[in-house]
Amino acid sequence: MASKGITILGASGSIGVSTLDVLARHPERFHVYALTAHSNVDKLFEQCQQFQPRYAVMVDPLAASVLEKRLQAVGSDVVVLAGAEALDAVASSPDTDYVMAAIVGAAGLVPTLAAARAGKRVMLANKEALVMSGQLFIDAVCAYGAELLPIDSEHNAVFQCLPSASLREREHRGVEKILLTASGGPFRTWAARDLHDITPEQAVAHPNWSMGQKISVDSATLMNKGLEVIEACWLFGLPAERVEVVVHPQSTIHSMVSYNDGSVLAQLGNPDMRTPIAYALGWPERLASGVAPLDLFATARLDFEQPDRERFPCLQLAYDAHVRGGYATIALNAANEVAVKAFLGREIGFTDIPVLVKAVMLTASTGTPMNLEEILIQDEESRVRSLSWIKNKKIH
Ligand code: NDP
Ligand code: MG
């Protein structure tokens, strides 16, 4: 089998590092075509030394020139490119077969869409890209013959529990409901009055998963689960009322599919993203991932609870936004990104996050943007509104 060329968008992040760990176990099947980061020169330098990609992209031009000098100094022939446009170029190049979409947030949308439009195997971790673009993204996947494989552990689990056919045919195969599991985050058992004083350090310390900062805060507010509900609707072609969230604190079951004959299929495993990454890289085969098999006797028990939508309003806000339409989901995502950044920067409190997101989401018109340009305009406007919300809050 010919070796597949891989581009990793967001190589320096948590998913990027796990992807390279899996790739290193299969040198005969894959070679790294391009690695990208925003500005983390040290990480990309180290990865370039080990994996010798053809291209390294740094979005920050200053970081690109530092990386280039460091690589030249060690005699490397990796070509360094700078700027966001270079992301699209490496994501759509004829020399790459698979694209791991692992940039965090809205910044991943344009290059991930470029990969879909170039007909690549798109391994989607960057859920925000799908939340923002919805039908437009799915249409591009279909029109250009791309393969869309979910990396998010829940969606990957669902994908594993569905019959092996194209993603869009699921509805007709007896699927009643998708049951997305949620750990409930670090504050699952906290009283509402204690949530005000949560610090960024407490919020990023996830009980079961080791992840980037933004998704860790999203897990703590349950916005991550909200974004995942929208992601599931688009990936599996189901309405929101057929995507249910089940809190499962052990994070052993990664999600389930409930069928019309009473069967519920689940995928279990240790909480390690290398399992879904290996599944997407190898599909339809399975590849060794380095993840230890689950020790059921150590797991001992599996608990399930309803999510608390009052203490964690972000989950319901995401359902509401999806029903309102594309403008609202873009506003929800943009406001959340601004809010999380402000929370991490200690400008707003933990419980301000849903208040800000709701205020901005409700200003969005109903309906859905028709093209990428309209999506990006709505994203930008929602960010401006979010920043002014934060400014006004500080004044009062
Ligand atoms: P990290 O914060 O660890 O990494 C983010 C990556 O994106 C880094 O490579 C970063 O570069 C790059 N990046 C950040 N901003 C920009 C930008 N403006 N333009 C281009 N590149 C940028 O995130 P994670 O790996 O945790 O998450 C990545 C995505 O995967 C998210 O969408 C998340 O929701 C999703 N995901 C993550 C999971 C996990 O376990 N971590 C699980 C499921 C989904 P630099 O380092 O230079 O800043
Ligand atoms: Mg997930």
Image: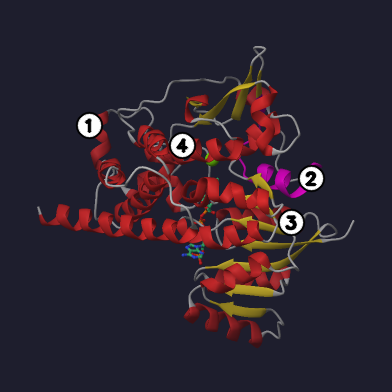
> Between marks 4 and 1, how big is the CA–CA gap?
22 Å
Q: Amino acid at mark 3?
A: Leu
Q: What residue sits right under mark 1 in the picture?
A: 193
Left or right of 25, for residue 173: left
Name the secondary structure under disc 3: helix
- Image coordinates of residue 200 in percent, x first then y, are 34, 49
Earlier sequence position, callout 4 versus callout 1: 1
Which of pointers 1 and 2 lies earlier in the amino acid sequence? 1
Q: Is residue 285 above or below residue 7?
A: above
Real-space Cα separation, disc 2 to disc 3, in angstroms? 10 Å
The magenta-colored residue range is 266-287
Q: Could you tell me which residue is drawn at 37 percent across and 56 percent down?
A: 378
Which residue is disc 3 drawn over?
Answer: 23
Where residue 225 is drawn, which disc sits there?
Answer: 4
Which residue is under mark 2?
287
First in residue order: circle 1 vs circle 3: 3
Asked if the residue at label 4 sits under 8 Å from ligand 2, the reply is yes
